[in-house]
Amino acid sequence: MAVNTIDAKMLAKMFLAGAQNLESKKEWINDLNVFPVPDGDTGTNMTLTIMSAAKDVAAMEASNDVDMQSLAKAISSGSLRGARGNSGVILSQLFRGFSKVIREQEFINIPVLALACERAVETAYKAVMKPKEGTILTVAKGAALKAREMADAGETDMEKCIGSIIEHADYVLSQTPEMLPVLKQAGVVDSGGQGLMQVLKGAYEAFLGKEFSFQVQPQTAAAGAPFAAGGIPAQTDIKFGYCTEFIIMLNRTFNIKQEMDFKAYLESIGDSIVVVADDDLVKVHVHTNDPGMAIQKALKYGALSNMKIDNMRLEHHEKVIRMAQQEEKSVQETAEPPKKAGFIAVSVGEGIHAIFKDLGVDYIIEGGQTMNPSTEDVLNAIAKVNAETVYVLPNNKNIILAANQAKYLTEDKHIVVIPTKTVAQGITAVINFVPDAEDADNEAAMTEAIGTVKTGEVTYAVRDTAIDNYEIHESDYMGIGDEGILAVGQQVENVTLAMIDKMMDDERELISIYYGQDTPEEEAENLKAQVEKKYPSCDVELQYGGQPIYYYIVSVE
């Protein structure tokens, strides 16, 4: 018998199955990275993005309390908070657009599915300043076009419709190398598009009745670790003694910023945080040593119902309670008046951290090419910088979208995202900041300054490939510039020198070299001497960066 609709319970199951399928394929998707670098991360970014929402959806499903509106909210807000990297941000925007349509429905039929897919694509395209075909966007658009075709043809069988959508989207994915020459040269399809296909295929398998067991991998408390099965961990593992649950009946709209502030507060007094917000209700779960703190904070947003507090241990450790009380006191302390401007920089490596700190950066987000921070990471950093205007330096092209997403979710501060693609550009941006200038003038000057910086990075290849007219073999060293491969060879020093040669022109006056954690200082000093000899008219600076994976980061300006 044909199935014509999808209800909230089935959609939750499909979403979790899609998340699990993506998680199981993430390393394969990472390996589709065009450049054969050791930190390809599309699969990881997309997985972390969807899992940020999946943990809330799993909690809803476990409680057998799923309706379309709260499910849509959990999927949208969870993925927005957890979005990492360009692929993760685009995935979150697809979910956001899709959720805007389904949240008003009790069931999803094929016309609703088509409209939701179209809204998903529209929302995702708007989030990208310069959309490029041959990417996850193209695959999503192909799926939406097929959904619309099926709806307009009067198709009512959901199984046939979803199967046709996946078949067509798979074909579009296979054509991405014809749209992007760099994919064809590398012999891969678009990794983001492949990630989206794994979500769709996992969801379809669940729709067809395939059984699966979804489990959220343990996370740190700061990331909102899920509570254990049964709600009661082993006594030896208990840090916070009271399992506290309640529902807030909101007295006004609970926007994403308020939701994140409330969640951050709960994280300061406990762990195992689950916050699922709907238009009128917020469902809350927290393990804490003082349920009153959570309740008192929640009362600011509305009346409470369905309150439930369980003592998970008979004896409370006084030391833990005092710590919780100290944390609460710290949260309630009156903040100093905000300064005019503050800085956040994404950085990796203790040497680079120190450089940014010396230049006056207020907050360092640990991450970069090896681990793209999430939108929520950026939002949490913004909350900790006490300034009227906060300048955010992503320092990686794959983090700019997440930084911009955090900007649009921030309401109480003026956020300026300088589109720095490398740490070298970030350093130049800070140097060009003028304290007494207006925000718009600083933004323009800093953005113009980073355009004068060329950056190159030296790492090693993890597989054989051909790209940018280079034959690359596994374990070769590569010098990668702003636009592609600049040098390939078997010796780090030779590759670095060749890379610098390609970056130089008559206008360059400064060469900055940052050596990584795996590069001996003696070798770095020898490289500097050779660069000084070859370019006597340039100033050459050598600094310890301490970055992993990349032996050298070099900038010329």
Image (spheres, rainbow, N blue to C red):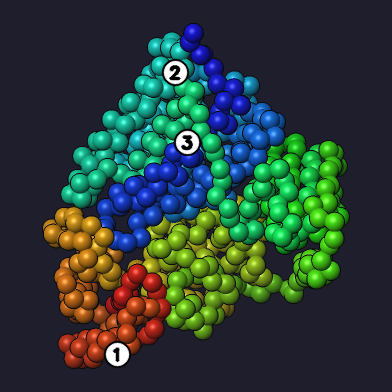
Q: Position of residue 12 (x, y in %)?
A: 58, 31
Q: Which residue is mark 2?
A: 159
Q: Which residue is mark 3?
A: 18
Tell me the element at label 3.
Answer: helix
* 411 vs 431: above or below: above
Image mark for residue 462? none
Residue 437 placement: quadrant: bottom right
Q: Residues within 10 Å of mark 3 (few under 14, many from 20)?
A: many
Left or right of 144? Residue 440 is right
Mark 3 and mark 2: span between their CA atoms?
A: 16 Å
Helix, strand or loop at label 1? It is helix
Residue 242 location in percent, x, y? 80, 53
**Can residue 166 be seen in this snapshot?**
yes
Which corner quadrant of the image does residue 533 belong to? bottom left
Which amino acid, by three-letter code, is at mark 3?
Answer: Gly
Where 227 sits versus 59, above or below?
below
User: What's the residue type where badge 1 is placed?
Assistant: Glu
Residue ID for mark 1:
522
Q: How many labels sit on residues?
A: 3
Q: What residue sits 54% from the left and 76% below the top?
A: 361
User: Which percent across, then down, holds residue 481?
Assistant: 26, 67
- In the rendered structure, the answer to whether residue 228 lies left or right of residue 475 reads right
Q: Residues within 10 Å of mark 1 (few under 14, many from 20)?
A: few
Closer to the chain start, of discs 1 and 3, is 3
Q: Residue at x 65, y 40 (%)?
A: 59
Badge 2 amino acid: Glu
